[in-house]
Image (tube, grey):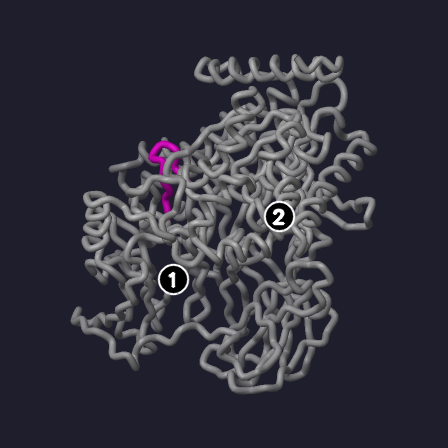
Amino acid sequence: MEGVAMGMDEARATLRGVPRAKARFLAMATVLIAWASVAPAEAIAPRRLLEVADFGGVTVSPDGRHVAYRIEQASVERNNYDSVWYVQDMETGSPPLRVADGGIPLREQTGLSVPAPATWSPDGRWIYYRALLDGRVDVWRAATDGSGTAPLTHDPADVRAFTLSDDGRELHYSVGAARDEVAEAEQAEYDQGVRIDRTVPLGQGLFRSGFVGGRLATQRLRDNEVIRHPLLADVPDRWKALDLANGNRRDLDVREIPPAPLTGAGLAVEQADVRTLLQEPAGSRIALIMRIGERNGLRDRPGTALAVLAHKRARTLTGCKADACTGKTITAVHWRPGTDEVLFTVEDPGEGHAQSIHRWNVESGAVRPVVRSRGLVNGGVRLLPSDCGVTASMLACVVAEADRPPRLERIDIETGTCQLLFDPNPALTRDMVSTQVRLLRWTDMDGRQFTGQFYPARHTGPGRPPLFVSYYWCKGFVRGGLGEELPFASLAERGIAALCINLAPSMEDGVEQYEQGRSAVESAVALLVAQGEIDAGRVGMGGLSFGAEITMWTAMHSQVLTAASVSSLGLSPLYYLLLSNFGDAFHTRLRMGWQLGSLEETPERWRRFSPLFNLDRIRAPILMQLPEQEYIHSLDYAVPLMREGRADMYVFPNEPHQKFQPRHKLAVYERNLDWFRFWLLDEEDPSLAKRHQYEHWRAMKAGLQVAAERSDTGDGS
């Protein structure tokens, strides 16, 4: 069956060189046999969460009949990702047709996969897309009938962006420095020594230490103290044109260069805090999502408003006044082709950020619902903003819930009727039913409301089960929170209840922000204990980025945790020293986020925030699984914890803020599962390959028990 995502690299290897029709049959048979062999206890093993097939680049053809999209899936064996372009007939719902290899997914500087929408030719015969193949980023063209693909640009430099001319006859694309020029600049620095200035990211290798464009590259800071860019990334865009009929190339005249996307700064309307805007295709009207409301101690305005401008020079807004538009969190807009309607997406924080889509007639003011979801209903990207494909009559949206992996659905705009187009994760979809994930709502003692996705423990022993909790990112199919390192479903399978808590609105004051997270955790534990669902004496916590910050804060300022795991650094004097090299921009961000100056300026504030000044308050053992780009910043507090047997650290080479290499991600997933089974269930994996891990953890446990006994008796010797 065309378009079925294999999900298993062994099957792919077996099928190399097999005729296509026979390969499809063997692929299905291989996958079905593998699915049937999954033992119940391993039904939601970490590797299955890692190998979820994800969608991206959902784009509808000019005639509104077909949809193109890219499927991306991890391969542990090759430590990389497969990406494949498909085209599917939305009217018939026939199986998707594989049309092209999408290459190695490009990534932005924090490790996230970059959205890759395709551009359709006006006649619908071709799709155009950027792809990293054979070490170069070109624009490729694929026939939508599956008959062939070819690279088009063949430029010495990687393509940064591209557009198709309105008539479809020319490809316009931009490039920066040539690949050879970048490599020569890197080598020159290596040979002559690297001058340390404000652009050098201190705390990682100085030469080709991070992946950019599929290769290890030397990196520099540009806009802030943490986001890295390759050498010569500041070379201005050079735009070129390729005649698609005869292959002739020319440099674009400055008047032909595609204009930069319209932003709020380009509008004439005053006092509009614009979050998102979208100009009407082939029209002048502009749909706006604006931030509104008083902050009252919050970091951002709490509300959003939907409005339309007649054109970018207009000064009068036409606002949506219906209940569906007011007092809600609006996240995306589309123009419905050939109509006066704007389609807009709403997130409901009280329902765990579940999304719904509505349509607003900007002339009549009428608003009608289109579809409501229990999770995400968008273009497939879980963190970066993304949209559905849209036609005059239907939407093509990627839908995903906490208990169901992503799939593509067709949604009738008039009736809201949904039809499944493609589920690339059918076995996991089936097995996730048994996890019985449910949305949890509760209120803390200060009246703050929280929501989270709760995974009840399965296969439990005597007594109430332990709990694992994380605080930050729980949208869509929750395979591991932000960074996807915490296997909630796998923990529940192994007898540890798991709770992913959604981030509450961010507070302007750093202490209040952290205290809000701590209160969310403590109040959730109290609720689940009162309901008889967990053991209050066995609670673990983990997270990445802000989730790691709240984990460390809770470990320092609460007695609720038995064990913890973090994948990011915390605030410390060493962190301050290394990042302050960037200068004023770093100091400004530090004051805005945490109200911190130097140690001399704000000593009391540092004592509240930094683990270094709270080592004696940290009672829970901490597993640290950090990226190479960040781990050095944490050593001033991590080394004392490790020396005292209170922390265990692993560092993953060449990784940015969010690790993306499949072998690294699988190692983190599995070690987190092992860690919390060890500390919360007193269980060990019998694998001989892990014996040294458990020897170390047993020594840590013995040392912590001795320290606790001395503390209880008052013997500090």
Q: Quadrant of residue 138?
A: bottom left
First in sequence: mark 2 vs mark 1: 1
Contact, CB < 8 Å: mark 2 with mark 1? no
76 falls in the magenta region: yes
On the image, the x and y values in percent for residue 339 come to 56, 79
Residue 200 placement, left or right of 268:
left
Residue nearest the viewer, comparing 602 with 500: 602
Q: Which mark is residue 602?
A: 2
On the image, the x and y values in percent for residue 41 come to 58, 24
Q: Residue at x 56, y 32 (%)?
A: 44
On the image, the x and y values in percent for residue 458 come to 67, 27
307, above or below 234, in the image? below
Write down the region rendered in magenta: 74-84
Please name the amino acid that badge 1 sits on.
Ala
Please name the amino acid that badge 2 sits on.
Thr
Q: Is residue 479 visible?
A: no
On the image, the x and y values in percent for residue 92 come to 48, 60
The residue carrying mark 1 is 118
Residue nearest the viewer, comparing 161 with 103: 161
Q: Residue at x 66, y 16 (%)?
A: 707
- From the image, which quarter does the C terminus lie in? top right
Q: Residue at x 80, y 37 (%)?
A: 527
What secondary structure is the magenta-colored segment mainly?
A: strand
317, above or below 555, in the image? below
426 falls in the magenta region: no
